[in-house]
C-alpha cells in the first residue's frame, strides 16, 4: 500500500480492483496479534511472578484483572478519539503506549508498579478494536465484513497462542522481566510501519483505484452503512435499544468465559491436574487453537449464511445463540470428566464454538452503528471487559475460599448458556441512528 501519486485512479474498462483493503486488514490483524502477545503472557507468567514477588492468590487476581479495568472504561473514549482524529494517528499512538507499558512491566520493582503498568497497557489497547472495526466499516464491503472481523479475532488468537507457547520457555531462559521487555519490541516496529502505510479511508490512499472504491462501497446501505460523521453520538437511541443491551450482555458472558482461559487456566491446570508451568501453557495453547479456528470459521459462516439466506438476523443472532449454547454444554460436560486430556479437548471444542460467535458480535456493531461504530463497539466491549476485569478477582476469591478448582467450570457453563439466551433478543436490523 505505497502512496505513489501516479498510481492508477481512473476507472478503466475491465480494470481489476486494487488490493489495498487486504493490506489494511492484514495490518489490523497483526496489531491484534501483537497486542494479545503482550497481554496474554501474564497468564503463563502469573505463578512465576507471584513466587518472585511473594504475592498471594488474591493479589494475583487483582494483578490479572488490572489490565481489564482501564481497558474496559476507556473503550468508548478511545473509540471517540479514533472517530475524531482517525485510526492512523490514534492506533499508532496506542501501540507505542502499550509497548512502553510492556517495558514498564519488565522494570517494575513493586506490586503496585506492576498494577500501574498493566493499567496503562489496558488503557492503550482499549482503542484497538473500536478503531479496527471503524476501519473495517470503511475498507471492507458489507458482504465480507464478518469475515474481516473474524480475521481480527484470528489475529487475537495467534497472539494468545504465541504467548501461551513461548512465554514459559522464554521465562525459563531469560526470566519474566526480560520476557516482557522482549514483548515490547513488536509494537514499536508495527507502529512505524502502520503510520507510513495506512490511510483512514480509500479516498485518502493514492494506490486505490475506482474499482476497489466501488467494491468497498457496495451494499453500503442499511444494515451496515459506514457513514463518516463527526456529529453528536445518539446516546439516547443507544440507551433505548434493546439490541444494544442484549448485545452487551452476551459480550459480558463471552468475555468472562474467555478471560478464564486467558488468565487462571494455566494455574487451574497446575493446581487441579498437577501440570508444570510449560505444560499448562501448551494445554492453554490447545484451547486457544480451538478459539483461533472458531474465529476464522465464524466469520466465514456468518457471511455464508447472509449470502445464502439474505437474513441478517439469522446470520448474526442465529449463529451467536447456537454457538454459545453448544459451548455451554461442552464446558458442562468437561466438569464430569476426570481425564485431563479428554477434559481439555472438550474445553477446546467449547472454545471453538464460543469463538464462532465472536465475529457475529463484532459485525453487529457495524450493522447497527452506522456512522457511530466506534462508540457502539466501544460500549459493547466496555461491558464485556468489565466482566473480564471482575472475572480473575472472582475466580481468585473462589479458589481462596473453597480450594475447589473444578467448581469454576460450572460457573462458566452457566455464563455461556446465559449468553446464548441473550442472542435471541439481538436484532441487527435495528439501526441506532434511524
Image (tube, rainbow, N blue to C red):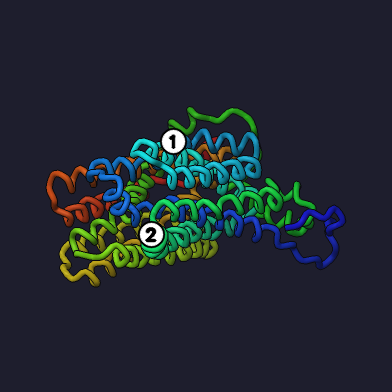
Q: Is residue 128 visible?
A: yes
- Do the residues under discs 2 and 1 have CB atoms within 8 angstroms? no
Q: Is residue 430 visible?
A: no
- Residue 63 placed where, x, y %? 33, 42
Question: In the picture, which quadrant includes the N terminus?
Answer: bottom right
The reply, left or right, for residue 293 in relation to residue 216 is left
Neighbourhood count class around disc 2 (C-alpha, 10 Å): few under 14, some 14–19, many 20 upward: some
Toward the viewer: 305 or 409?
A: 409
Give the residue displayed 13% in from the left and 44% down from the top: 401
**Distance from label 2 to label 1 (Cα)?**
47 Å
- Residue 210 placed where, x, y %? 78, 56
Quick check: 104 above or below 205? Answer: above
- Residue 394 placed where, x, y %? 24, 42
The numbered mark at residue 241 is 1
Toward the viewer: 250 or 116?
A: 116
Give the residue displayed 52% in from the left and 33% down from the top: 77
Q: Secondary structure at mark 2?
A: helix
The reply, left or right, for residue 25 in relation to residue 180 is right
Nearer the observer: mark 2 or 1; the answer is 2
The reply, left or right, for residue 15 in relation to residue 434 is right
Residue highlighted by disc 2 = 171
Q: Secondary structure at mark 1?
A: loop
Indicate which disc, 2 or 1, sits on the residue closer to the N terminus: 2
Give the residue displayed 41% in from the left and 51% down from the top: 177
Toward the viewer: 139 or 246?
A: 139
Q: How many marks?
A: 2
The reply, left or right, for residue 350 in relation to residue 312 is left
Toward the viewer: 177 or 56?
A: 177
- Residue 154 placed where, x, y %? 48, 61
Amino acid at each position: 500500500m505505497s502512496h505513489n501519486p501516479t498510481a492508477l485512479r481512473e476507472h478503466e474498462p475491465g480494470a481489476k480492483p486494487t488490493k489495498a483493503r487486504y493490506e489494511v486488514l492484514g495490518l489490523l490483524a497483526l496489531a491484534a496479534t501483537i497486542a494479545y502477545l503482550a497481554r496474554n503472557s501474564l497468564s503463563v507468567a502469573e505463578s512465576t511472578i507471584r513466587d518472585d514477588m511473594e504475592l498471594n492468590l488474591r493479589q494475583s487476581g487483582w494483578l490479572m484483572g488490572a489490565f481489564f479495568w482501564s481497558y474496559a472504561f476507556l473503550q468508548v473514549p478511545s473509540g471517540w478519539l479514533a472517530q475524531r482524529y482517525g485510526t492512523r494517528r490514534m492506533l499508532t499512538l496506542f501501540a507505542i503506549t502499550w509497548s512502553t507499558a510492556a517495558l514498564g512491566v519488565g522494570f517494575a520493582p513493586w506490586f503496585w508498579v506492576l498494577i500501574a503498568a498493566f493499567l496503562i497497557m489496558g488503557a492503550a489497547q482499549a482503542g484497538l478494536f473500536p478503531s479496527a472495526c471503524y476501519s473495517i466499516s470503511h475498507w471492507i464491503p458489507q458482504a465480507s465484513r464478518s469475515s474481516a472481523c473474524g480475521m481480527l479475532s484470528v489475529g487475537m488468537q495467534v497472539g494468545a497462542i504465541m504467548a501461551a507457547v513461548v512465554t514459559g520457555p522464554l521465562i525459563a531462559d531469560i526470566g519474566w522481566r526480560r520476557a516482557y521487555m522482549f514483548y515490547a519490541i513488536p509494537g514499536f516496529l508495527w507502529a512505524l510501519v502502520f503510520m507510513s502505510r495506512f490511510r483512514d479511508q480509500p479516498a485518502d490512499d493514492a494506490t486505490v483505484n475506482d474499482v476497489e472504491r466501488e467494491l468497498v462501497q457496495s451494499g453500503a446501505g442499511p444494515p451496515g452503512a459506514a457513514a463518516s460523521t463527526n456529529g453528536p453520538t445518539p446516546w439516547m437511541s443507544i440507551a433505548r435499544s434493546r439490541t444494544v443491551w442484549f448485545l452487551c450482555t452476551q459480550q459480558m458472558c463471552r468475555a468472562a468465559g474467555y478471560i478464564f482461559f486467558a488468565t487462571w487456566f494455566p494455574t487451574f491446570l497446575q493446581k487441579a491436574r498437577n501440570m508444570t508451568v510449560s505444560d499448562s501453557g501448551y494445554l492453554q495453547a490447545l484451547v486457544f487453537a480451538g478459539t483461533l479456528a472458531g474465529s476464522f470459521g465464524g466469520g466465514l459462516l456468518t457471511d455464508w449464511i447472509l449470502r445464502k439466506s439474505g437474513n441478517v438476523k439469522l446470520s448474526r443472532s442465529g449463529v451467536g445463540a447456537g454457538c454459545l449454547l453448544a459451548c455451554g454444554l461442552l464446558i458442562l460436560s468437561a466438569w464430569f470428566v476426570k481425564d485431563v486430556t479428554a477434559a481439555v479437548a472438550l474445553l477446546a471444542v467449547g472454545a471453538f464454538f464460543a469463538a464462532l460467535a465472536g465475529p457475529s458480535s463484532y459485525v453487529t456493531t457495524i450493522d447497527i452503528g452506522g456512522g457511530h461504530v466506534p462508540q457502539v463497539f466501544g460500549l459493547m466491549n466496555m461491558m464485556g471487559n468489565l466482566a473480564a476485569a471482575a472475572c480473575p478477582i472472582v475466580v481468585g476469591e473462589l479458589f481462596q475460599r473453597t480450594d475447589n478448582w473444578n467448581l469454576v467450570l460450572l460457573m462458566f457453563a452457566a455464563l455461556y448458556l446465559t449468553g446464548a439466551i441473550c442472542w435471541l433478543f439481538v436484532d441487527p436490523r435495528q439501526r441506532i441512528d434511524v
